[in-house]
Every structure is written in structure tokens, then in C-alpha cells.
Image (spheres, rainbow, N blue to C red):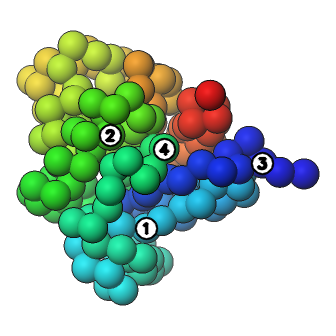
Amino acid sequence: MPGRLQGRAIVVLVDEGFEDLEFWVTVMRLREEGAAVTIAGMDPGEVVRGKHGLEATADVSVDGVDAGAFDSIVVPGGWAPDKLRRHEAVTRLVRRMHEAGKIIGLICHAGLVGISAGIVADGRATGSLGIKDDLVNAGATWVDEPAFRDGAIVWGRVVEDIPDFCRELVTAIAEP
């Protein structure tokens, strides 16, 4: 039986220090639903290590990602978002996808990328308590919930909330 995301293309960002479970559980869940998942990092073929030792390999460079070729973008948490947000290619890609109304998945510290891309002002947001002040100072309204959708952004709080985040994310991407 085909999954709910059959025919959908999703790009997931990765860099050194990603949160292992937020990355791998989300990638596996999207693939389980039939999505074509592409991993984008700073260099194609680059192997990066997560906070807890799991590895991921970038299929493509963020520089080479065409926002029009994807239905959604996901940014896992960990330390990687603080590194990713420093690259114009990353913030430009997230901003373009947001402007096109595509689903943006942000969990835990990934809100830092959303802040730098300029897409969180005037919306509801959640994530690790470590970035609460950053989100509020960027104009978001802090909500202490496991996961929810606000417009085109699907928010997840922390590792323990991955099931809720994945449920919200799959539902949002599956919409016509």
C-alpha cells in the first residue's frame, strides 16, 4: 500500500552536531510514508556526525538545491542549526520555500534557522527552551506544546516529542 507522501520530494538539512534522533527518526518516518528524501549538507558526499555519534551523508549541497523541486524542507535540531543558519544558501532556501507556501519542519533548535531566514515573526513557535528567548525576540509567540502547525511551519519541541512532530509533519505535507 503506498504511503501518504508518495510522489512528494522532501529535503532535510544536515550538518555536524545534528540531533541524531530528530534527524533519523524523521527521515525514516518520511520514507516510510513514501516520500523521496534528499539529504542536503554543505558539501555533497560529506559525512557528518550527530551529537550522539550517528552519521549522515549529504546527497547534495545546499547550494545546489532548487526550492521548486521540493514539496517540503525539514531542519532537525541539535547543534547543527546554529551552524547552518550562518550560510546564506541555507537561509535563502528556507525563505524561498516559505515564500512558496511549502511546508517547513522545525524541531528543537531548528527555530534558529527559521529566525535567521526571517520566517518566524508574528507566528506561534516552539522548540527547546534554550531558544525560547531567541524566538520571542524574533517576534514569535512562544507556545509550550509538543508539536503543532502554524501556517506552513510545523514546529516540534524536543526529542521526546518526535512522534507528535512526525504526525503533524506528515499530515501537513500530505495535504493537496
Q: Position of residue 144 (x, y in %)?
A: 39, 21
| Dot 4 or dot 3, earlier in sequence | 3
Tell me: 138 left or right of 147: left
Alpha carbon separation for disc pair 3 and 1: 20 Å
Q: Which residue is mark 1?
A: 39
How busy is the neighbourhood of tag 3: few (under 14 within 10 Å), some, or many (20 plus)? few
Q: Quadrant of residue 116?
A: top left
Residue kind at label 4, given as amino acid type = Asp
Alpha carbon separation for disc pair 3 and 2: 23 Å
Alpha carbon separation for disc pair 4 and 3: 15 Å
Tell me which residue sits at (48%, 44%) in the image: 71
Residue kind at label 3, given as amino acid type = Gly
Alpha carbon separation for disc pair 2 and 4: 8 Å
Say if residue 103 shows up in the picture: yes
Q: Secondary structure at mark 3?
A: loop
Q: Quadrant of residue 53?
A: bottom left
2 and 1 marks in contact (CB < 8 Å): no
